[in-house]
Amino acid sequence: MDLYSIGEMLIDFIPGNEKDSYIKKAGGAPTNVAIAASKNGLDAGMCCSVGDDDFGRFLLDTLREYNVKIIKSDLCQNAITTMAFVSLDESGDRSFTFARKPGADMFIEDQDVKEEDIKNAKIVHAGSFTLSGSPCHESTLKALKLAHDNQKIVSFDLNYRDIVWDGDSEACKKAVHECLPYIDFMKISDEEECFLTDDKMELQEFFKASNLSLLVKTLGADGAECYYQDQIIKVPGKKVKAVDTTGAGDAFWGGFLSYLLFNNVEEISDLHATLIKKALEYANVSGSLCVMKKGAIVAIPTRSEIEAELERD
């Protein structure tokens, strides 16, 4: 497949149009990135595990609806699907309240990730997993190493929700740094920079000391910047009215990886600055279109919608 995504699925409840109403949507960066790739016309698969409840079934049905292959589809009898209630302020920025703490059984285990699936993928993506020494962290770490050993491009989306979830920033930092040797592409937001660096280290300095081939930082309405070799490649933000920013970062990263896959990037040697800039522009439009729509996964735009907006620009 083009994109093989690994990690946690959860249910987001975001405010609806009416008072005290909520829209439920699939959450978690691996889920949304896989759906974004599929909506871009690519072959995407998701390795995940959810509780045997109505919410877990909704998540699996959502993946099927958007033509994402479910690599691991059994429902866990001893776990309940995790839910996050998302509060939005006037600008669309969000905060999370977690309704349930998941049991470790709902997460992927070592045997869930098959080497043949890794070998058949072009890009392996991971993110959104509980970081502080959990079974999910250990399993995902092994999966990233397996992808790295098979010379696949490994993508990782650092999500501050994980940090909020664990409530232990030092443990989070340690877990992220454990993953770094196996990651090629990393995406962070400006809020997440502090979990890679400290007060004495600039992000560019961190990038140079890491094993990463590129590091992308999203800047919300101010666009994005990418650290690549000795360059910082920047794209400006798009002026759009935000209806809801939930999922915008995932739409951005799904768009970015999709653009690289359209251009047959399967090895790091295929990268160059012009291609990266075009991928950032494509991703920027994807994230911008996402925030203009309300709520559910349908907010992640299709390839034709993104290309139409690029042509209009």
Image: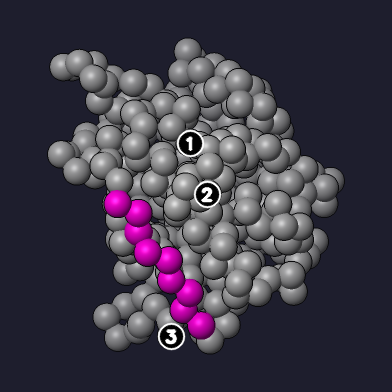
* Residue annotated with mark 1: 300
How many marks overall?
3
Task: Find residue 147 and report its image quarter.
Answer: bottom right
How far is mark 3 from mark 1, CA to CA?
Answer: 33 Å
- In front here: 111 or 23? 23
Q: Amino acid at mark 2?
A: Glu
Q: Amino acid at mark 3?
A: Glu
Q: Is residue 137 visible?
A: no
Chain part drawn in magenta? 231-239
Q: Which mark is residue 311?
A: 2
Q: Which residue is at a point 27% across and 41% down the rendered structure image?
A: 242
- In front here: 153 or 291? 291
Task: Find residue 179 and report its image quarter.
Answer: bottom right
Whole-percent x and y of residue 151? 78, 65
* Secondary-structure class at tag 2: helix
Q: Which residue is at a point 31% across and 61% down the rendered structure image?
A: 222
Residue 100, compared with residue 17, is above or below; it is below
Label 2 crowd bin: few (<14), some (14–19), many (20+), radius 10 Å: few
* Residue annotated with mark 3: 205
Dots 2 and 1: beta carbons under 8 Å? no
